[in-house]
Amino acid sequence: MIPISWFLIFSAALFCIGLFGVLARKNTIGMLMGVELMLNAVNINLLAFWAYRYAGQMNGLVFVAIVFAAAAAEAAVGLALIISVYRRRTTVMADELNLMKG
Amino acid sequence: MNMDLLIWLIPLPPLLAFAAIVLFTNRSKALSHSLAIGAAGLSWLASMVVFFTAVGREELAKHPLGVDLKVNWLPLGDGAFKIGVQVDPLSAVILFFVAWTVLMIFVYSVGYHNFGQPAGDHDKPGLPPHGATVKVKGHGHQVPSVEPMYSRFFAMISLFAFGMFLLVVTDNLLTLYMAWEIMGLCSYLLIGFWYAKPSARDAAVKAFLTTRVGDMFMLLGMAALYKMTGTLNYQEILANPTVLEMLASQAAPVLGLSWAGLIGILIFMGTVGKSAQFPLHVWLPDAMEGPTPVSAMIHAATMVSAGVYLSIRFFPLISAGWDGGGALTPAMMTLAVVGAVTALFAATIAVAQNDIKRVLAYSTISQLGYMIAALGVGAYVAAAFHLVTHAFFKALLFLGSGSVIHGMEHGVLHTHQHIDPQDMQHMGGLRKKMPVTFWTFLAGGLALSGFPLVTAGFWSKDEILSGAFNGGHVWVFVILALAALLTAFYTARQITLTFLGQARSEAAEHASESRAVMTAPLVVLAFFAITAGWVGIPKAFPGLGGLVPNWFEEFVGEMLLVHGEAAHHSLVPLITSLVVALGGLALGWWVYRDVRAGQKDPLQKPLGPVYTLLQNKYYFDELYGATVVRFSRWVSEVFTDRWLDRGVIDGILHGIAAAGLWLGGVLRNGFDLPVINRFLGDTVVAGGTRKLGAETSKIQTGRLQQYMLMGLAVVLAASAIIYFFFVMA
């Protein structure tokens, strides 16, 4: 049996990769991908705890399915925003999108 | 080696090859195609081992290979949805031709995409290669150039091969559906392989959306089946007389059908989409925009065959309640009508097409209709037999046409003549320039038209005709015989226009034979196009019957729970199939034997407006454009956008906004201006806040990622505080 810590370490690593991607990528699509990675890291965490602690119950799976749905919705909204930004500004580089500057 | 495990492993190598090419080797063309062909070879090897083991197994239909190894795939309320593999006689024969055609087409693709040639002068990814200039002894020389997206092509066809193998070896409808959709995706991607061409893009979208219509119904059928039986496993439904009887006897709430009839028709709708049956046939001819190996593999030999395979697989359900003779069930009637109509209708269109690949595309539609019609009249074995032989000779014909186009493109590059290399009007006389292509194409063409005794197509087509005749369905028999006549006619037309006579363009005079890597697969497939029929010679056939055992009938016929009445072999269908095949071929040759360059089609005059109608494919694209497409546009543009979105929803929002504006005006004049602005505004609060704001706005850089970094810092700081002050304490 694989110890649970392996899953947790793996998901932490995946989360950090995603976080790094969000923080370091200049391309907003890349940032969106990073967010997906982070979400999936969370999913792995959830599934790991579910499998090791509550394997008899459905809750863990359902929880993850809901996260997937949220992630899909987020990706759809995100991509739509990116496309709309691209149409207006002809760029998707995060550092060129500085309309929020105070 | 464990046979169950081996069956599981069949689809795997192409998937791994796909991943490896996409992730690692896409920069190296040689490595990419080696991986793809190696993977296809491994799958081929495993398939052959499984096939020959299956052939040697007694009572294979009752005890298929591979059923002992199942995995729990989806946990459900009680128990789990299991998936597994199985190889019964039907999957075994499908596996045989899929493995062969896939491997041959993979090898052929290397030559088709000009591996080893220089990169083109102006080639761009997303467009077919235009040729490169090579200096030979000081002066420039145009030669074909290598495909810019070579590795991408091999990655995609590998993924496709994975889907096809998975579809064949799976033991339940759900996995089949997944493989089905994987293939749909690959079909979309590969039709649109040259995505910079608008026509290819449109064709890809059209193929995807049209098949989706069928898939939607199929999904409904699958849901209904699961609801009624609680399983999607083939053995538990299709080899189980109690379940079939239950489905056949309970009435469904639609159109007075039984559940078996309703589910059968819904699942058959999936076939209609995937195998391009009338009325969803419109996508297949346009799909010829893709590279020719794709047309051969996906749109002739494997994916469209998968649609027919689905119907053959669910034949026990479709025919539930049928006793082997007598009246057809409503579902079978649907199959017979759709299949027969498609067979004849597509064959008529093929007569008036000039694009070498489009003729073959309509021919494919027509032949698939043949199989569906055979299934509809209960000729189960004949349908499966024709499926196998057709896959071989149609893949051969497509690859042959690819070779012809290649040769013509060579001529075009050589002569700088601006003509369409796919148009048969510009060909002619190619038999001397391209002998291997000619002889193999001839073998495929004769098999397609059912040339008597030697070719595979004769035996399978004859069996379908005799199945329809002996079952007493004379109208199906007559329609199919007419379609066979037309098939022989347009095949002879195609061969005559392409290979015989004199060259009708300069490019055709300078066409040259393709490389061995392209012609070798042609020879292999030609071998099967001739011999694949000899395993199914009916016992009752005059003269030859009984010399060779009718292995196919015994092997695949074992699948049926209810056997049709023993075929009393009548001479009528045999004579008919001889007459239509030879007559059609002779007629086609006679009409087109000396067409000159620039001359119109000899049929144009006698047929008149009918010819125009055929050439425009009965205006089906225009009809769908004027109805379905326009309706969808109306719904989205007028109904949803203009009325619902901008009228109703925006109207309500504008009303709310107007109310808000009014309230705002009241508050502004009564409270804001006198109290806030004058009393607090300019004096105490605003001044201080402005100063504060000016100081803090420096961190508002507008850069999203710096905000996030700050957020991260705050979270870390907060975590540290909580940890040190609350957890440690």
Image (spheres, coloured by chain):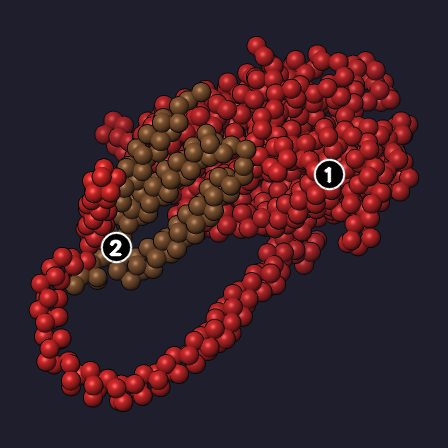
Q: Tag 1: residue type?
A: Thr
Which chain can be seen in red? B
Residue that appears at 43% across and 26% down: B17
Q: Quadrant of residue B477?
A: top right
Residue type at mark 2: give it: Thr
Q: In terms of secondary structure, where does tag 1 sit? A: helix
Tell me the CA gap for discs 1 and 2.
54 Å
Q: Residue furthest front?
A: B729
Dot 2 crowding, Cα within 10 Å, few <14, some 14–19, many 20+? some
Q: Is residue B705 above or below residue B456?
A: below
Residue B29 in view of the camera: no
* The hue in which chain A appears in the rendered picture of the protein: brown
Q: Quadrant of the N terminus of chain B?
A: top right
Q: Depth check: B542 or B593 in front?
A: B542
Give me the disc on residue B523: none
Mark 1 and 2 residues: CB-CB less than 8 Å, in contact? Answer: no
Task: Look at discs 1 and 2 and give the one toward the viewer.
Answer: 1
Residue A91's tag is 2
Residue at image position (35%, 86%) is: B662
Secondary element type, mark 2:
loop
The location of residue B2, given as percent across then percent down, is 59, 12
Question: How many numbered marks, from 0 up?
Answer: 2
Which label is found at residue B229? 1
